[in-house]
Each structure stands twice: as C-alpha cells, then as structure tokens.
Image (cartoon, rainbow, N blue to C red):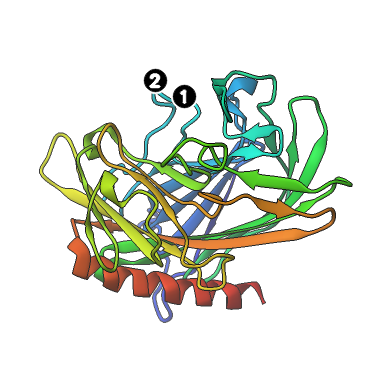
Amino acid sequence: MTTDHSAAPSGADPRTHDGTEPAARGIGLTHEHERSLTLTHDGVDLVRYVYRPWDTQLESPRPYFHPIRTLSGDLVSLYRPHDHVWHKGIAWSLPNVGSANFWGGPTYLRDQGYQQLNNDGSTVHRSFDRVGTFEDAAVVGESLDWVTEQGETWFSERRGFQATADPEQGTWTLVFSTSFTNLTERTIPIGSPTTEGRPNAGYGGLFWRGPRSFSGGRVYTPSAEGGDDLMGERAPWMAYAGRHDEHDRSSTLVFVDAPDNPGHPTQWFVRNGIYACVCPAPFFSEEVPVEPGATSSYSYAVVIADGDREREGSALIAEAGRAELERAEKRWE
C-alpha cells in the first residue's frame, strides 16, 4: 500500500516538536495495490475507487466509486442494493452494447422484455499510467478493456479522473473522462432499453445510485424542479438533493455534462420515487454506432456538496463544475 499526500501550504512547517505525525492536509491518495484507490481531503476519506472488483459475472464486473462522502463525511452512494445488485455507487455502465451487456443482470430485448442471457461482459483494468497528486488535485489515468462474457475484447478504454476540494463552499468535485475505441472489424451500436422499445428506460453511462434515505429527494435542472417527471429531459446539468438518516442533514450532487460531449446537452435518466439515481444518458433514445477503429469520448463533473443547495445554489455549483472540467483538461497537458 502506498500513500501520496499533497504538500503542506507554502511557509508551513510540517514538523511537530514532540515527534507526533502532523495531520494530513489537502488532497491525498492511498493505493491499495491490485484492489483500489482512496481519495482523501485533510485525512478524511472522500471516495474509494475499486478497480479490481470481485463481482460475479452476472453483475458485469467493472470499476466503481464507492463509498462516496461529502467533505463533512456524509455517505451519498449505495453499494449492491438487493433490488439491483449490479448498481454500485458511481460507475461507467452500459446495458446495450451490440449484443453485449456491460451493465449487469438481464438485457432488455425488443418484443421480448428482459432476458437473462450469457452476455454480461466485464470492464477490465489493465494499468495505470498516472496516479498522483498536485497541490490542489488528485489525478489518475487508467487503461481498460471491455471483454465480453465469451472472452472477446471489443473495446479498449482510456479513462481519467480527478478530484479537487473547495472547503469554503463545502464541496468537492470528481471529474470523470472516458475515451473508448472499437477494436473489432464491425460497427457496434450502443443504446439502451429505450432504444429497444421500453419507454423512459434510457439508462446507460455514468450511473449513480444514491442511499435509500434519498428516495423522495428533490431534482433540479436549470429550468425545473421535480423528480421522476424530469426523466428524459435535456439539460446541461442535473442536481439531486437528499436527506440522511440518523440526523437532519442533507446533501446535493450536481452532475455536469461537458459542453463538447456528443449530443450536448444530454438527456437524463433520473428517479426519485422507488429509489434515488441520476445518469447523464447519451444513448437514451437513439443508438450511437461506433465504427471499427473509431473512438468515442465523454466527460462529466460530479460536484458533491453538503446541504440542499436548491435550484439556485445548484446552478452556481454547476458553473464551478464546468470550470473544473476546463482545469482538468489543462492538468493533463
């Protein structure tokens, strides 16, 4: 296990006079070899990224972010709920990739409904090419393959994510980017259950499942406030605010679609009734064909905030998320 913490502020003396280890400051990163990365701020865990999952094939093993916490330590993600055991925090999850399923569980087929097939593929970590911290950010670069249940590698993926914190605003931001290339000699369409004929089921993409207590939470967009009724709406960002059990605090997650993403502003898959979830869904209502050798790219910011920021506050957070998307691009240069 290795640990990397950002440096102490300029002019500060990191040493103590009695030999006691000083408290961690700023963004940090801990690597549990061949298992996970944990991002921290001031020594407090913000999120664990499991890149070597131990899931069964039925659950389409793939890396995921969980647990996810606010700066004050409130949990804002759910792992393996009994109703959908393939839901895991935040994960890049795609249910209809040609004949394969990189989501988990059954596949929705036109005129047949959900069928459990032998098609639950895996997103397999191959290597990291960058794992470290700047003074203000943790930065990770990763290579992965999309492997079908039959062992065929259909796509290679270059993934990156970065974390920054803004304690004054009570927020921290996760920027996620993916570029995936079709390695086969055929065009592979990426769609959703909706493109197969099921209305309002266009899930697929960067999918978040919230805590049980977030059911009944509030959903915000630039022009509306609601819940399940915002399913399928197009907007540059969407926020979800929920309340926690055991105390009366609330938290807000704001998902920002990068302006240069294909199809921007994206459609959104969202639920607040039976459970809490949000997914910017670029394949919601139309299949996107990926030609042989072609690469598709998407980027998102997820801003995790203490408190219910309501619609006006969520708009301000979304602006900060967009700015962080731009800064993330520069850190890669």
- Label 1, secondary structure: give it: loop
Residue in the foreground of this view, choosing between 43 and 130 = 130
The crowding category of the residue bearing disc 1, from other C-alpha atoms within 10 Å (few below 14, some 14 to 19, many at least 20), is some
What amino acid is found at the position of numbered circle 2 in the picture?
Answer: His
Q: Which residue is outermost to the front?
A: 111
What amino acid is found at the position of numbered circle 1 in the picture?
Answer: Val
Query: Residue under circle 2?
Result: 82
Residue in the foreground of this view, choosing between 114 and 182 = 114
Where residue 293 sits: x, y (%)? Answer: 84, 56
Location of residue 158 with respect to 247 vertically, above or below? below
The crowding category of the residue bearing disc 2, from other C-alpha atoms within 10 Å (few below 14, some 14 to 19, many at least 20), is few
Residue 49: mark in rendering: none
Can residue 17 be seen? no
Considering the image in quadrants, where does the C terminus appear? bottom right
Q: Which residue is outermost to the right?
A: 185
Where residue 18 sits: x, y (%)? Answer: 35, 57
| In this picture, residue 281 sits left or right of residue 287 | left
Location of residue 227 with respect to 6 vertically, above or below? above
Q: Quadrant of residue 212?
A: top left
Q: Looking at the image, do the residues carrying marks 2 and 1 touch, with CB atoms under 8 Å apart?
A: yes
Where residue 47 sits: x, y (%)? Answer: 44, 47
In space, the residues marked 2 and 1 are separated at their CA atoms by 5 Å
Residue drawn at x 60%, y 31% is 53
| In this picture, residue 226 sits left or right of residue 303 | left
Considering the image in quadrants, where does the N terminus appear? top right
Can residue 209 be seen? yes
Residue drawn at x 56%, y 26% is 111
Residue drawn at x 46%, y 24% is 85
Residue 85: mark in rendering: 1
